[in-house]
Amino acid sequence: MSALARWCYRHRFVVITAWVGLLIGLAVLSQAVRTTYDNSLTLPGTDSGNAQELLLRSAPAQAGDSDQIVWQVSQGSVTDPAIEQRVSAMLARVSHLPEVASVAGPYLPGGTVRISPDGRTAYATLSFTGQADILDHADVIRVIATVTAAREPGLAVELGGKAIAGAEETPASNASLIGIVAAAVILLIVFGSLLATALPIVTAVAGVGSGLLLMAPLSHLTPVNGIAPILGALIGLGVGVDYALFVVTRHRRGLRSGLDPEQSAVQALNTSGRAVLFAGGTVCIALLGLLTVGLRFIDGLAVPAAITVVCTVVAAVTLLPALFGVLGLRVLSRRQRRGLRAGGPGQAESGGGMWARWSRIVPRFPAVLASLGLAVMLVVSAPVLHLRLGFADASNDPTSTHTYQSYALLAEGFGPGFNGPLVLVARARSAADLAALGRLDRALTTVPGVAAVETAPAHSTPGAGPTIEVIQVLPTTAPEDPATSALIHRLRGTVVPRATHGTTLQVYVGGLTATFVDFAAVTSAKLPWLLTTIMGFSFLLLVLAFRSLLIPAITAVLNLLAAAASFGVLTAFFQWGWGTRAFGLGAASPVEGYLPELVLAVLFGLSMDYQVFLVSRMAEEWSHTRDNARSVLAGVTDTARVITAAAVIMIAVFTAFVFTGQRDIAEFGVGLAAAVALDAFVLRTVLVPAVMYLCGRANWWLPRWLDRHLPHLAIEPPAQEQPTHLPGPALV
């Protein structure tokens, strides 16, 4: 690292120019190739996945996204001639727009089922030629404009569905800006210097910017999910600012101890820079561990996020030393520079301050502090026992959106189940199968929880193969209601098998609601494998880095506690609805089904960051003194301030994304913000030092035979590269 740091420092303008050129080049490339997002939620081997596959093969026109156009009159009926003429003309115009496969309205023969019992509300089924993920937003926006043009006083017209929701999503740029401003304010308080504040911000923006711009060419090589840029910005800004903060803090400390700027920059990169490489590597390993889940949807989030983290690490170890070379001593505040000139070196290690005092309290009450910290984590984690995975329906969208207004109109006119129809796809090969299909149609109307049943043959050409029939089942309850999930399981477990017994009739229960139910089941089943993979790699890395068995074991247990606490907060905040109304995120509803894997991967990576920075300082002190108490004290004194400052920055960045208006992103932000807060202020500054003090020299024990056979992974530089060791804080 020292050679790289020295080269970047001495060739600072070359490095800065290269970074500017890289960002410009990536921006041009991104505009040239464009991003092709893949949001397909395919679940091979599940009922919903089989239903979608069968539709794609046999009836592709019905395999596209199915949305709704809803209208309601304030007086009279939707069948009044003037209303019927106005709406029919609009539906005809929509049917001829690009990407529209068909429009089935209530004014056609057999369409009266699409009119509410009171006659005031009606809807049309809008079928697109493809799934919502692959539709051009410009075409969907054209549909929205054509539909809403039919509004007039007394006639409300809205649209709902996945394609409409995708076109209404707000960009994350505002949330990113809020996060950057919040980080800048915190850094200014920490550093007391505008120039020092700018260093982590510039570095993080360069790293995140390059990562986000890489997503366009990357999307032509591997799946990239539509929310990958938001997720990449959220994670990248958090870790990017933090990584730069750790390096800048070490550099400023070196300057105040009397090192010249180049020597201090080299030392900072050779110590904190190594820790940044290690920490970034653990985050990437945790993210790429998501590939073990084996779902294309999650793969499209994990790979782009990992690449963004790599870019932030590269920026921290190349761009930062170049900027150090440009600023010189101006990285320090004016007061610090005056103090350095007046008092000489040694100003960095005062041994005082709040965290120095705290580090001296820990040895006095280690058992009490460990018990209190554990109690806090267990109390916060308790709601996780009631966690229910699922999805939030359109009733939780911002009230100004078309999807929310459409949901409200349909729920008022037809009941909440009309917003989440179940799609049964049947394949009949014989007369006996067709008879069984008739029995199933009749049986469905008597199932508790079913409001209505609509049947439409999708493909039944004589002599041309099996008959494919699509049956739309409308539940009496909302899509996110547990009763709807119970209905899906009842159809699959009892109703369908009973009707098809003794025949070759195949019936699959699909639709968006069923897909999310299957998705939650698949991800829950694979969660233990993901946990095993991430924890196994993390344990191995820490054993190699710190030559200890106990430290990796403590880290694994505490990371699990942090994960449980994070989901405890999510359960209370979103599932119980304790915080959703305050942030305009709708009512209480289940936690998104794909969230556990993502939060766990990122959380384990971030927790490892703080553990590495804290324990690496303890290990440095242990290597010099072989005194465990002194090592724990030094670790807390020298790193707690920067760890908590970094945590506050991450909390600010993650919280900013709550205001995107997208519930899934808000859940991600709240979960990570809560986890980072508990990790930094309870685990790393209370539980870890207290437990390590209680464990004594056992912290650093590794069997000699194992030590001989394990490769060495050094976070700290080799002995010949070590900076002059500054006196550590004294025990009192």
Image (cartoon, helix red, strand yellow):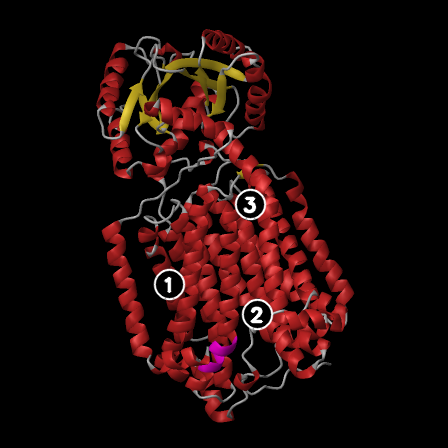
**Distance CA(mark 2)–CA(mark 3):** 26 Å
**Mark 2 or mark 3, earlier in chain:** 3
The amino acid on which the numbered mark 1 sits, given as a three-letter code, is: Val
The answer to whether any part of residue 513 appears in the image is no
When the figure is inspected, residue 458 is found, relative to residue 667, above or below; the finding is: above
Circle 2: is it few (<14), some (14-19), or many (20+) Cα within 10 Å? many
- The spot of residue 46 in percent (x, y) is 51, 30
Q: Nearer the viewer, residue 413 or 272?
A: 272
At 52% from the left and 19% from the top, the residue drawn is 476
When the figure is inspected, residue 125 is found, relative to residue 267, above or below; the finding is: above
**Magenta span of residues:** 266-271
Total labels: the figure holds 3
At 37% from the left and 35% from the top, the residue drawn is 165
Q: Nearer the viewer, mark 1 or mark 2?
A: 2
The amino acid on which the numbered mark 2 sits, given as a three-letter code, is: Phe
Q: Is residue 270 magenta?
A: yes
Quadrant of the rendering where the C terminus is positioned: bottom right
Q: Quadrant of residue 712?
A: bottom right
Q: Nearer the viewer, mark 1 or mark 3?
A: 3
Q: Mark 1 — residue?
A: 205
Q: Quadrant of residue 325?
A: bottom left
Q: Mark 2 — residue?
A: 613
When the figure is inspected, residue 708 is found, relative to residue 521, above or below; the finding is: below
Q: Mark 3 — residue?
A: 596
